[in-house]
């Protein structure tokens, strides 16, 4: 697979409730893309390695308390601090498989009661994904999977609420995969959808911005 010179990478976002399988799937996806000769990297938000990411991590593990608006803006800032690198990677032909993005930001914060439009505002101008894949699992099923860790938000009642907000945010362009299927089946379906997207982005299609 020899990429032509104007080929750019695809920005692909995986969304879903906690324990829906996003992290396992994104690792497998990147290996298989690389194996087929498409440069790809696995990214995730929050990126806990940056200065902002460390504050987020401490909040999630209940080591610090923050106002709901404040933590929302930190999650957003964490995406902004990676924006230019993201753009550079895509331009250089590397596809990014991103485990959570702005949709997590808006779904989780609005599930706490923050206004949805207010939640979207700081996301305006971030790079828009070429594809959003939602790994769909009923909150009860997700809760049965090996149990949640001890982090904030990892509670069945809250996850039910988040699911409602994901539904509000989704549009016809989202690809929904039934995440209750065996892992191998999810992997196969995901790979097919993602490959289509990676190929379609190689034709010089430009990257757009949220929320359009
Ligand atoms: N989360 C994640 C948010 O509340 N807002 C965001 O913008 C993002 C990216 O953080 N329960 C929540 C969802 C998760 C938690 O994510 C940590 P992960 O994927 O478990 O590391």
Image (cartoon, rainbow, N blue to C red):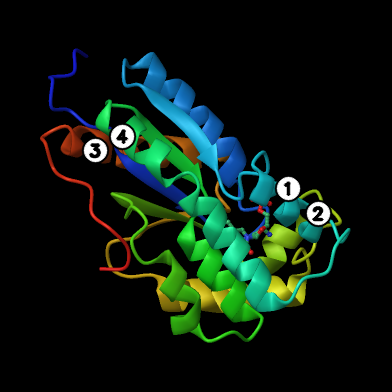
Ligand 1 closer than 8 Å to label 3 CB? no
Residue 196's tag is: 3
Q: Position of residue 24 (x, y in %)?
A: 60, 37
Of the two numbered discs 4 and 2 on the same chain, state the one appearing first in sequence: 2
For marks 2 and 1, give the CA distance.
6 Å
For marks 1 and 4, give the CA distance.
26 Å
Quarter holding the C terminus is bottom left
Of the two numbered discs 4 and 3 on the same chain, state the one appearing first in sequence: 4
Q: Give the quarter of the image for residue 171.
A: bottom left
- Per the image, the residue denoted by label 4 is 90
- The quadrant of the rendered image in which ligand 1 is seen is bottom right
For marks 3 and 1, give the CA distance.
35 Å
Q: Answer with left or right where residue 42 lies relative to residue 126.
A: right
- Per the image, the residue denoted by label 2 is 58
The residue carrying pointer 4 sits among few (fewer than 14), some (14 to 19) or many (20 or more) residues within 10 Å by Cα, namely many
For marks 4 and 2, give the CA distance.
30 Å
The relative height of residue 16 versus residue 43 in the rendered view (above or below) is: below
Q: Give the quarter of the image for residue 34.
A: top left
- Per the image, the residue denoted by label 1 is 54
Ligand 1 closer than 8 Å to label 2 CB? no
Quarter holding the N terminus is top left
């Amino acid at each position: 697979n020899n990429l032509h010179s104007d080929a750019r990478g695809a920005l692909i976002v995986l969304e879903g409730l906690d324990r829906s399988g996003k992290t396992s799937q994104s690792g497998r996806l990147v290996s298989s893309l690389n194996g087929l000769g498409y440069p790809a990297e696995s990214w995730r938000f929050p990126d806990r390695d940056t200065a902002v990411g460390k504050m987020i991590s401490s909040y999630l593990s209940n080591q610090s308390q923050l106002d709901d608006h404040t933590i929302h803006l930190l999650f957003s800032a964490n995406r902004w601090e990676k924006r230019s690198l993201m753009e550079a990677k895509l331009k250089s032909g590397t596809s990014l498989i991103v485990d959570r993005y702005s949709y997590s930001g808006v779904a989780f914060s609005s599930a706490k009661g923050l206004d949805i439009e207010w939640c979207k505002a700081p996301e305006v101008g971030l790079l828009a994904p070429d594809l959003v894949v939602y790994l769909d699992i009923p909150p009860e099923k997700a809760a049965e999977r090996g149990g949640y860790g001890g982090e904030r938000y990892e509670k069945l009642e809250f996850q039910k609420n988040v699911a409602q907000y994901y539904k509000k945010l989704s549009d016809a362009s989202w690809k929904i995969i039934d995440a209750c299927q065996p892992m191998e089946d999810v992997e196969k379906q995901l790979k097919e959808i993602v490959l289509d997207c990676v190929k379609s982005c190689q034709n010089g299609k430009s990257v757009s911005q949220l929320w359009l």
